[in-house]
Amino acid sequence: MDTVPKQNRFTGDSQEPKDRRVRLSRMRMNPRRKRFLLIFISVFLLTIGGIVTSAWYMNFYLPPRVQSAVVNETEFNQGDLVKRVRMIQAATGYSETNITLTDVLRILYNPDLDVTAGPFNLGMVQLELLIQASHEFNVNVTDSDIDTFVSTVFEADVPPGQESTQDQLDREFQERYRSYLNFNRITEDEFRRLALEQLTFLGMVQAMDENIAEDIEHVDVSWIRVPLIPDAVATSIDTFEDVVAVRERALTEGFARVAADYSANFVYALNNGSVGWIPKGAFPDLDQWLFGTEESPGMSLGELSEGIQSGDHFVIAKVNDGPKMMEVGARWRSKLREQLLESWVEDRFEKGTSEGRVSINFDSSLYEWTVEQLMQTAGQKRGMFLGG
């Protein structure tokens, strides 16, 4: 494309210098302008690139690497936390779509520990405490144990009357195993870690048995359990308004009759509220009422307690007989094992934090990224139950 030289608007003559040296001088200035322009563009691009890189670093690279907790030499970061919650999401079929900061923190460390609910009720920190201390109780989960666990969970289903070769069974096992890992975005190492935690938990529960005496003081108890939070589905909302009123009803209308109204909330009691003989230590929140202390005696026979908060319920208890020494039955021995492990975990966590060996980062701003990541998958039905 030809360049038309500038012209004088009055005479029409060209404004290009006639002197050849002037024209050459101006031509020599062009490379400087080009260099200035290139420098300006380079600085601009570097600035934009820096902003993009910084945003990528702050929003994608850094968050999953931010430390969430430390248990002695073991560290957990935000990425570990996201993976763990996603595994739980997968196991529940992504049924929970509203994930809050509280939900995330409970996966890291559950302050409302309930060992009777199984290993998934423990947070990652609490499970790590179990694993690190398992050798103290001669609990040793080997790779062979984990292999057996995996084989049991994903073993092939052979219909009655159908014969299959070992090669067919192995192929179906691998297919089921790999499908589960892929659908739920879990690596094999992560699933084996999950297996290690579950097996260690079960081993530690059993290890508590050596701390339980053969004979323990028992009392015969009946109770009414009233939820702290009303459940409109389980029963009428009116029955949850006033624990004091419930106790008054039990006194005037009869304990068994009122207990039947709350039987949906009973775990250990019959519909009439009868629990039977329970050993000391099975329900620590109730011990001072049922068995007394060195400073004060326990409840009198037939006396109704006030509403005693125990977990997420109020308990109105009545002692029918006892106390007396009795052999601990299998049912209550299991409950005592779980209670002892729960107390051990709480004590070990408290000791670790006081000594600086265990710490949790509770800065809520650091967990916004975690919640956002989990909300992206909460509505997805990617989970595949182990049964198929």
Image (cartoon, rainbow, N blue to C red):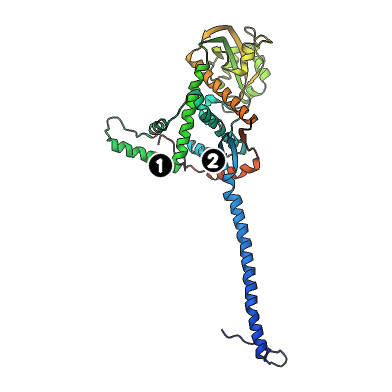
Residue 97 seen anywhere in this rendered image of the structure? no
Residue 138 placement, left or right of 39: left
Relative horizontal placement of residue 232, taking residue 151 as reference (left or right): right
Nearest-to-viewer mark from 2 and 1: 2
Q: In this view, does 221 lie above or below 75?
A: above
Residue 281, given in percent of the width and then of the height, sits at 58, 16
Q: Residue at x 65, y 40 (%)?
A: 364
Name which of mark 2 and mark 1 comes first in the sequence. Answer: 2
The answer to which image quadrant residue 25 occupies is bottom right
The residue at the point 46 percent across, 29 percent down is: 199
Residue 377 % position (x, y):
52, 44
| Side of 25 relative to 261 (left or right) | right
Residue 317 visible? The answer is yes
Residue 257, quarter of the rendered image: top right
- Which of the pair 277/161 is nearer the observer? 277
Q: Distance between the residues labelled 2 and 1?
A: 22 Å
Mark linked to residue 80: 2
Viewer-nearest residue: 264 or 45: 45
Q: What residue would you read off at disc 1?
A: 179
| Residue 169 in picture, x, y percent from top left | 31, 36
Q: Mark 1 is on which residue type?
A: Ser
